[in-house]
Each structure stands twice: as C-alpha cells, then as structure tokens.
Image: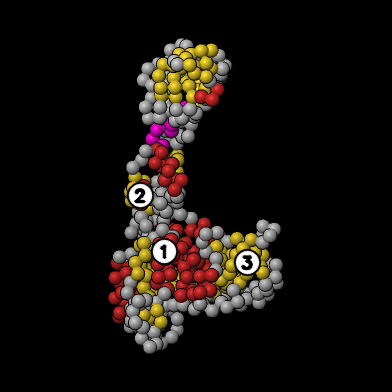
Amino acid sequence: MSHSFTPAKAGLAPLMRVEEARAAMLSMVGPLEAEFSRFDDALGRVLSDAVIAMRDQPPFAVSAMDGYALRSGDTPGALRVMGESAAGRGFEGCCEPGGAIRISTGAAMPQGTDTVVIQEDVSRDGDLVIVPAVVPGKNIRPRGGDFSAGAVLLPAGRLLDGVAVALAAAMGAATLSVIRRPRIAILCSGDELAVPGNMPGPYQIFDSATYGVGGLVHAWGGIAQRLDVARDDPAAIARAAEEGLCNSDLLVVIGGASVGDHDHARPALMQLGLELAVEKVAVRPGKPTWFGVTPHGPVLGLPGNPSSALACSHLFLRPLMEAMLGRDAATCITLRRARLIGALPANGPREHYLRGLLDVDADGQLTVRSFEDQDSSLISVFAAANVLIRIPPDEMALAQGALVDVLPLGGL
C-alpha cells in the first residue's frame, strides 16, 4: 500500500461523535497507488492523473451536413462537381474556382472550400449543381471545435462514467491512469452463523452481513474479499484476521466487539498489535463501531446486526474507500433536507439514523417517512429503505412536516 498509518493517540474518549470518529479514521488512510486500465475496465474507476488532449478534435474542419463544399465567392450560380469527400475518405485535390465537391456529414473540408450548401438547397443536373448565394463558414465544424491539443479533458479524481470514457477515447488514448481498486477483506465471526446454501445447525442463522457489506464494497468501486466465518475463538479469529490484513488494504470485522462473553474480535486483533483510534461511537445503531491500525494495516469494526453493519458502512466504510480512491470523502455523506411524514419522538444522547423512504409529493417537495420498526436485526426493513434519516443527539420530538436531514442510500 502507498499510504502510511499513525498509531492511536492516548487519552481518546471512549465514545466519539460520528463526525469526530470519521475524521479520526480518515486521518489514517490515503490514496492508493495508480495503475493503468484499458477502457473495457475503466467504468467506475477514479482517475489518478488528469487526461490531457494529445490532438485537436476534430483534427480538421469537417462538414456538419450532407451537401456540397465550395467557395462562397462563386455563389450564386452553376458549379461543376469535381469529386466527393466522404467520412474517412477525403477529397485529395484542391477545389478549383467554379467547382464544388459532394460532401458527407463528418467528412473533411476539401482544400480551397470555405462553406457547405446543404443538398436540400441545390438542384443538380449531371455534373452541374445550381447553388444559391451563401456566406463563408456555413455548416462547418471547425478544427478543434470540441477540444484542442493540451486541453484538460478530465481532471484527476473524476469518476469514470460512460461519457467520460467516451471523451478519453475521442482523444485516442489506449489506457487511463486510475487509482487501484481498494481491496476490502470482510471477516465475520460467530458459532451461530451458517453459510447460505449449507444446512444450518439447530441454533444457527445464515450469515448475511458479509454479503451485504461485500455488495456495498463492489458498488463503491472496491474489491470485496469475503473470508470464511471464524469460530468464536480468539486464536481462530486472529488467524483469519491476519490472513485478511496481509491481502487487503482494509480489514472489516463484523460483530464480536460488544461486551458479551463471546465477543472476541477486538481481543483477537490485539494479538496482532491493534492500536485503537476509535473505541465506540455515539451513534444508533452502531455504538460498537471501532477503528484501529495494526502493523499489517487498518481495521474497521462494524456491529454484528446486519442492518447496523450496513448503516455504519454508509457512515464510515464508504468515506474510507473514497479516501483510498483519492476522492473527497465528504461527497458520499452529503445530506439532503426533506419534510417528515408522521411524528418522531425525542432522541437520546446518541446520533440516530432511522431507515426511511424518501419520496416527492404533488408539489415537487421531498418528503420522508420513517419505518415503524427500527430493530437493527431487520434486513427486510433496510431493503425497503432508500435513505437514513439523521436525528441529532438530544433532539426534541419532531412533528409532522418538520424538516429533517436524510442520507441517500443510492440511486437518489
């Protein structure tokens, strides 16, 4: 990895505000190294270097219409057709006075011509074409009309969508310099977890959190490396964590960080030299969220409940990935304002993120309603949500119609 890490500072408060915890995490990661990518694999990647135009586009003046290229000074009148200029196959000679060249859209303007008359405005009889009076420069796309050599076409940090790739291709480049995709190892531990597709034990549930977080990693431009579920044993967790750390840029550990007798994640990581920067976060759901560094790399600990893990992935994992991709982490946690449908009770001392449904009313105003059941284990509720509603700490009860902040979960 190209970035370096700083050990946790002594004297940190055990419970940190969301913004404070996120800032502490982001201070310990930086952009990954660059690599070259062909266009086939460029979509969704982030440019590490600006794309500079190597030549003018178009590289020569071209016709914007089907018609005839000619000298404006020869019009109006009857002109002799001397040849043709087609897209990809230009007229090799020079248009003589009194001559005209049949031309197609996108074809190069022949030497000696300064305007194009569209075919609907002329009449042709054999090799003669009758043209009206025209002015110079009509129906011509000038050389460099799209961009000129040396122009910055795409800045560093640009997320490559189809239009950006098309612009780079128009320049003629074969590859683009992009930030390497972050490799995120995902480890979940617990004797109660069974692998989907296998027969669960009488007291087991299926692992879903690693698949959910892995899907988010993929959607956010990373490479998810799901590790086998580890047993509730510190040594087993430590072995799996070390493997994940050595083959990734960030290890995400789901669960095992609460205060129960079988929460072994952090003690296991301590065996690998973990130094904590964030011990707990004043957020609901997600109080057990933590972050630290080991000699092998950084570790983000997420709550064990799948919905809590998904919510905290949006709050902390995505900004970390954005930083690794060399982008402004704030762009992915930008809040929007919406009017509340229904009322909400007063909030406690922790920042609360409620799963909600954002919509647009008949007046074009954004509205949001909170799902009634906010139990952190309910994945079905998270699947129906498209935003998280942010309620500040110690917020008073909110009445219907109150303005609230919402964090989009994607596609908004």
Q: Where in the figure is residue 190, as x and y percent of width and height? A: 37, 81
Q: Residue at x 43, y 86 (%)?
A: 260
Spot the residue most to the front: 125
Q: Residue at x 46, y 34 (%)?
A: 147
Point out the tag, 2 or 3, that comes first from the N-terminus: 2
Q: Secondary structure at mark 3?
A: strand
Give me the disc on residue 280.
Answer: none
Other residues around mark 3 within 10 Å, as few (<14) / some (14–19) / many (≥20): many
The answer for how far apart the CA atoms under marks 3 and 1 are is 26 Å
In the rendered image, residue 171, in percent from the top left (x then y), is placed at 40, 38
Q: Which contiguous range is marked in magenta? A: 53-63
* Badge 1 element: helix
Q: Nearer the viewer, mark 3 or mark 1?
A: 3
Q: CA distance from mark 2 to mark 3?
A: 39 Å
Dot placed on the residue nearer the N-terminal end, 3 or 1: 1
Provide the residue designation for mark 1: 217
Please give the residue where the numbered disc 3 appears in the rendered image.
368
Question: Where is mark 2, residue-wise?
Answer: 40
Residue found farthest to the top: 97
Instruction: Give percent across and percent down for residue 345.
Output: 66, 77
Is residue 55 found inside the magenta-colored segment of the image?
Answer: yes
Residue 38 visible, this angle: yes
Position of residue 138 relative to residue 246, above or below, is: above
